[in-house]
Image (tube, rainbow, N blue to C red):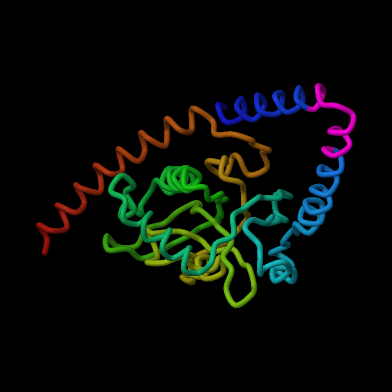
């Protein structure tokens, strides 16, 4: 909010300066503005939309200088703005997230929605815009506590540039030790013969659970943030209890 007000104040100040300028100065300012537009407009026009469902044929377009791009999710017809990181940047960012003690990654039984929400907010504070990758169905994975089943799973997704191409990578410290391509993440969660995938899609960072699949959210919902904090706190306590019980059995 404060950044927006600061921008508006600066804009108003510049408009007043332009209004009070002499005709000669106005001509000079307009010429400078025209030259700036000539530089900015091509960059805007070159911002592409990646159709991941179509095989990501346009992923390589503009990869050399890209800092952000748009991922199109066909299932829910959404265009998601995402940051683009190099492989090194993605690995380093993942390590920072995985090292946090306030996110109970080890409690894979439940709470993926709260962990993912916490992660995307942390990433946003770092200037990295993430989205979310969702899988729905009868999903099963093996953990140190045994097999767990989910009705859906969600984790942050960021675009990663590798070998001159850009593709969606999932950040899921509950299942992996590094960022992995979306297809690798999906394969692990659906690898068991009894697993049944019914839906896969992407959303922006503001979505919280599958109920937000088709919503056009433009900000975080306060109720979801409250639930995120409560869920992470409760699952963190449960994780401690599980680890104690596991230690007693060993």
In the figure, 49 relative to 209: above or below?
below
- Residue plotted at (43% across, 43% down): 118
* Quadrant of the rendered image containing residue 214: top right
Left/right placement of residue 151 relative to residue 4 reads: left
Quadrant location of residue 237?
Answer: top left
**Magenta run includes residue 194:** no
- Quadrant where the image shows the C terminus: bottom left
Quadrant where the N terminus sits is top right
Prevailing SS of the magenta stretch: helix
Report the side of 60 relative to 94 (left or right): right
User: Magenta segment, which residues?
Assistant: 18-29
Where residue 82 sits in the image (x, y, percent)?
61, 53
**Along the viewing direction, whichever of 21 and 79 lies nearer the viewer:** 21
Quadrant assignment, res 19:
top right
Q: Residue shown at 41%/63% (left/top)?
A: 92
Q: x%, y% of residue 145?
A: 27, 60
**Residue at coordinates 67% horizontally, 68% vertically from top-left?**
63
């Amino acid at each position: 909010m404060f950044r927006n007000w600061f921008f508006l104040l600066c804009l108003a100040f510049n408009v007043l300066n332009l209004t009070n300028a002499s005709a000669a100065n106005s001509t000079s300012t307009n010429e400078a503005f025209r030259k700036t537009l000539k530089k900015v407009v091509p960059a805007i026009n070159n911002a592409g939309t990646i159709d991941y469902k179509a095989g990501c044929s346009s992923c390589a377009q503009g990869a050399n200088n890209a800092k952000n791009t748009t991922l199109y999710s066909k299932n829910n017809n959404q265009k998601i703005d995402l940051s683009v990181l190099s492989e090194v940047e993605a690995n380093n960012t993942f390590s920072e997230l995985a090292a946090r003690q306030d996110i109970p990654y080890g409690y894979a039984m439940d709470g993926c929605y709260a962990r993912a929400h916490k992660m995307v907010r942390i990433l946003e504070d770092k200037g990295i815009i993430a989205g979310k990758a969702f899988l729905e169905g009868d999903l099963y994975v093996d953990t140190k506590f045994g097999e767990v089943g989910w009705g859906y799973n969600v984790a942050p997704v960021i675009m990663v540039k590798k070998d001159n191409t850009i593709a969606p990578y999932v950040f899921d410290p509950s299942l992996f030790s590094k960022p992995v391509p979306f297809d690798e993440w999906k394969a692990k969660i659906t690898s068991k013969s009894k697993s049944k995938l019914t839906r896969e899609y992407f959303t922006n960072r503001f979505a919280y659970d599958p109920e937000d699949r088709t919503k056009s959210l433009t900000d975080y919902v306060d109720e979801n943030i409250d639930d995120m904090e409560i869920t992470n706190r409760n699952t963190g306590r449960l994780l401690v209890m599980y680890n104690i019980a596991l230690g007693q059995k060993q």
